Each structure stands twice: as C-alpha cells, then as structure tokens.
Image: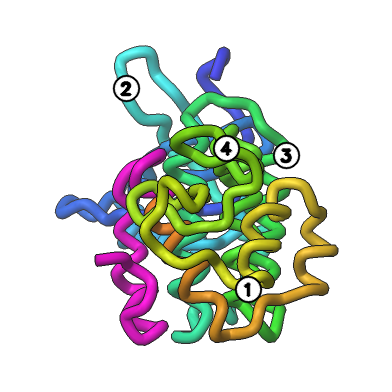
Amino acid sequence: MRSRSANRSGIVMRRRVTPAGDIIVTLLTPQGKIKAIARGGVRGSQASRLNLFHHVGVQLYQTPQADLATVQQSVLEGALPRLSEPERHPYAHLLSELADALFQEGEFSEQAFELYAGALRGVSHHPDPEWVTLVMSYKLLSLAGFAPRSRQCARCAAPDPAHPDPLGGQLLCGACSSQPPHPAERLEFLREVPRRSVRALMDQPLPAEQRPGVWRSLERFVTVQIGGVQSWRSLASSLGGEVVSA
C-alpha cells in the first residue's frame, strides 16, 4: 500500500489465531493478496466477521516498521454458509490453499479474485462440488501460468501423449510411460481443460469412476510445480483415500 491507510474488499482465504488472541488473515482482493492482523480480534466483534471464506470490507493501517497491516475495522459483505458442510468444506479449503500458493502478495489480479470467488460460489451452490473443484483448480493453475502440458509428452515432446505421468502429473507418450493410457473421457478432459470455458467443462462432467485418476494427476502436478498443499490429506479422507498418490 502506498499510503498508510487503505480500504479493501476481499475474501478471507487463510485465518490463524495467535496465542495472544490476535487474528492473522490472508485476503485475496481485486488488487492482490494481502496479509493483515486484527489485534485482539478473537475477543472482539471482528472474530465472527473475519472467518474463513467470508467476503469482507476492511480498513487497513500500515506503519513503515510493521510487517503486517493492521485491520482497524471490518464489515461483512457476503458469506457462503454452506461451505461449512462436511461434503463441501474440504473442497473450499483446497481451493483456498491452492490460490494462496499461486498468487503472491502485492500482485494485482482482478481476474484471480473473480475466478477464486466464482470457485467458492460453485462449491457452495453446485450439486457436484467435487467437479467444480477439479475444473476450477486447473483454471487457477492456468491463470497463474502453470497449465500442464497436454499436447506433447512432458519428457520427450512427442505429440498426442495419452499415458499418465505418475511423478509429475502430466501426460506421457507410450515410450516414456509404463502405465496404460488414460480412458478416452479422462484423456479428453486433461487435454482440453486449459482451453475450454468453465461453462463448457461444467456441462460435461466426468463420471465418478474417472475422477480418481484426475485427482492423482492434479495432486502430483501441484506438488511438483507449486509445493506441498496440506489440504490433500483431508480431501483424501473425504474421498475414501483415493486422492493422494503413493
């Protein structure tokens, strides 16, 4: 922030309470990602407003000596209460952790904010939150410049790869992979997800039996390209242990 005070509107994508009772939040806003502290917030009125996934307006104050901006006031602008449901919360948490890893503090990206906000709304309202999360995870990766290679083998650049890459989560040709090819429906999704619109992808969901292979590819790709995302473990638990690769 150029001036000491600023007003921002964003979504709480990460929240931590310190032993002193302060609340440290990470917000994704149309102006970029912001990390701030609400001092003594856990004992005040801001505790209920600065909850995970809440859309809030905040007044921030930054001093030259402080690492974090201080949240002086906050106003709840929107909430998605269904994200607390056990069948939806792990997906929202994964999307938030992924977006937090992909977009850096101070980066301006209104498109990132809109995509992340739309992803949370989809997980909250859509009858198939798992499919929303798969589609929007790949879209967040693409926006951040981490789209998996899908038209060439990730190792030798041979055209039209169709086999899984168990280490990197991309696509390999038959000569570079010891595994059988992806089924046709799954392969089409992995090839087309960077190019098709969200609406087109949502209109053609993969059958449930095809999704574990996509989850394994996504988890491997994110781990190699971005780093460890802790939410995989809780998500694996909710999906019967089929997400995290061995």
Give me the residue at 51% from left, 19% from top.
4
Q: Badge 4 is on which residue?
A: 158
35 over 183 or under it: above or below: above
Position of residue 19 measured from the top left corner of the image (x, y, whole percent):
15, 54
Instruction: Quarter of the image for the C terminus: give it.
Output: bottom left
The quadrant holding residue 137 is: bottom right
Q: Are marks 4 and 2 in contact (CB under 8 Å)?
A: no
Is 241 covered by the magenta stretch? Answer: yes
* Residue 67 seen in render: yes
**Nearest to the observer: residue 240 or residue 163:** 163
Instruction: Quarter of the image for the N terminus: give it.
Output: top right
**Nearest to the observer: residue 159 or residue 243:** 159
Give me the residue at 65% from left, 39% from top.
143
Q: Badge 3 is on which residue?
A: 111
Give the magenta range.
221-246
Q: CA distance from mark 1 to mark 4?
A: 30 Å
Q: Amino acid at mark 3?
A: Gln
Q: CA distance from mark 3 to mark 1?
A: 21 Å
Position of residue 31 measured from the top left corner of the image (x, y, whole percent):
65, 31
Give me the residue at 59% from left, 33% from top.
145
